Image (cartoon, grey):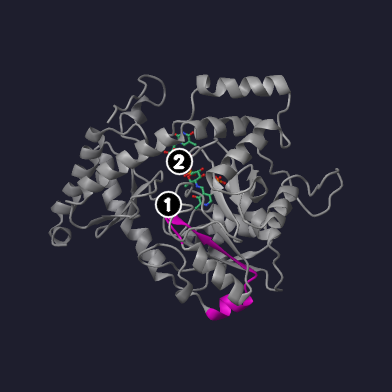
Amino acid sequence: MQSRILPSGGPQEEKLSMIPVFRPKLPTASKLLPYLERIDEARWYANFGPLYKEFQARIAAHFGLGADQVVLVSNATIGITLALQAIGLQRPDRQAICPSWTFAATPHAIAAAGLSPVFADVDAETWTLNLDLLDEQDVRSASGIVMVSPFGSLVDTDKWERFSERKGIPVVCDAAASFDAIGRDSFRVGTIPIVISLHATKSLAAAEGAIILCTDPDVVERIRQMSNFGFSTTSVAQVLGTNAKMSEYNCAVGLASLDAWQETRSRLAQIRNYYWEKLRDVSGVTPFGGGQDYVANYMVIETVGDGYQLSNHLAQRGIETRRWWRSGCHQHPAFASYNVKPLPETRRLGIHTLGLPFFTELTEADIDHVVGSVAEYHSKEPALAAH
Ligand code: T4K
């Protein structure tokens, strides 16, 4: 593996003496330059310009879709809101079901669509909403469901599409970190809008931005209109909307990231595989996400111990970690008033999971140190070592 190169000096030096939990690397200035020069020449900076159209066409080709089945927006949070509004929420109850085990963006996006989030629990193995565990009464009265593909993993959109048709309830898929998982197994692009984030922390990054995929061109066109003040062909608002367009500058970063995608992908796979190989020997720890054939930007583990204590132990050894989704969204003050049910699986994940360092410049020596320190924590506790 190549070595991790961290700059010395400057205000971040102390932090960088730790192994950071995350350190994005987006295309460098030289890789962006050809695209920036095209912006200079076209003098087209926003509002569906040439780079938007090229990025849209290349994303469509990547997923085997038509350009009319792809829309780009300014970030995934607004993308989820627009997707919810575009799929026609016809039931009177202004509620949408979502997992509590997700990033705060999911319930924020629901609230911004004028709905109240109804938090549901997740499956112990897949960490996503389990159709069989959904409360029938909630499903009957909800206007929609936002299901989340956690940490870039697979979800069964085929199954969700059948459920959506059977129950007559629109579903949106928050696949913020799942650029590479889409198209694998039954994670297919269909009539459920799939929203992928292009934030700097994601595997394919445009700094800010999002891709929405859906096989129904009418839904895609509605989202596109809503992202541009509800305009269709003229500047007359046909539907309620906002400004959520992806700029030419963000498309330039997205295009340069796509140019480097195969390289990024193989590097992420290399790091993940090395982690997995090393973690296999540590008892009491299970890495999340089993797929060999897709990559994401996370290494989240489940420990039989306490994620918070493990995090402190690793910090003492110079390793930064993150409890990415903390104890679930229902525990955030902003969403506390929405939760009425106990969510035991979410609670368990909040206690027993931890995000380890994961980024393209991690070295084998870094990973050896991280995994060695994780093993050390587990071996110190006789009760944990017994697992
Ligand atoms: N749904 C789900 C399930 C999501 O996870 C997300 C986003 C969304 C929806 C919404 O997508 P967007 O609307 O953002 O497109 C970060 C990201 O801002 C967020 O996009 C992401 N999920 C979430 C999981 O992570 P924070 O507040 O945790 O980011 P922050 O600033 O703490 O950065 C994470 C780490 O990366 C830190 O160690 C600092 C480092 N970092 C970050 C940036 C941006 C850098 O070193 N350089 C950088 O430029 O939310």
| Direction from residue 178 to residue 80 in the image, left or right | right
Q: Residues within 10 Å of mark 2 (few under 14, many from 20)?
A: many
Q: Position of residue 8 (x, y in %)?
A: 35, 20
Q: Amino acid at mark 2?
A: Ser
What is the spatial separation of the Cα atoms under label 2 and label 1, in whole angstroms? 11 Å
Q: Considering depth in this image, is 363 or 380 the residue closer to the camera? A: 363
Measuring from the top left, give residue 378's x and y in whole percent. 18, 53
Q: Position of residue 329 (x, y in %)?
A: 49, 59
Q: Is mark 2 within 8 Å of ligand 1?
A: no
- According to the picture, the residue beneath numbered tag 2 turns out to be 203
CB within 8 Å, label 2 to label 1: no
Q: Is residue 325 visible?
A: no
Closer-to-camera residue (111/182): 182
| Amino acid type at image mark 1 | Phe
- The numbered disc on residue 151 is 1
The answer to which quarter of the image holds residue 273 is: top left
The stretch in magenta equals 136-155
- The percent coordinates of residue 70 (x first, y second) are 63, 48
Q: Can you say whether 40 is above or below 351 in the image?
A: above
Q: Secondary structure at mark 1?
A: helix
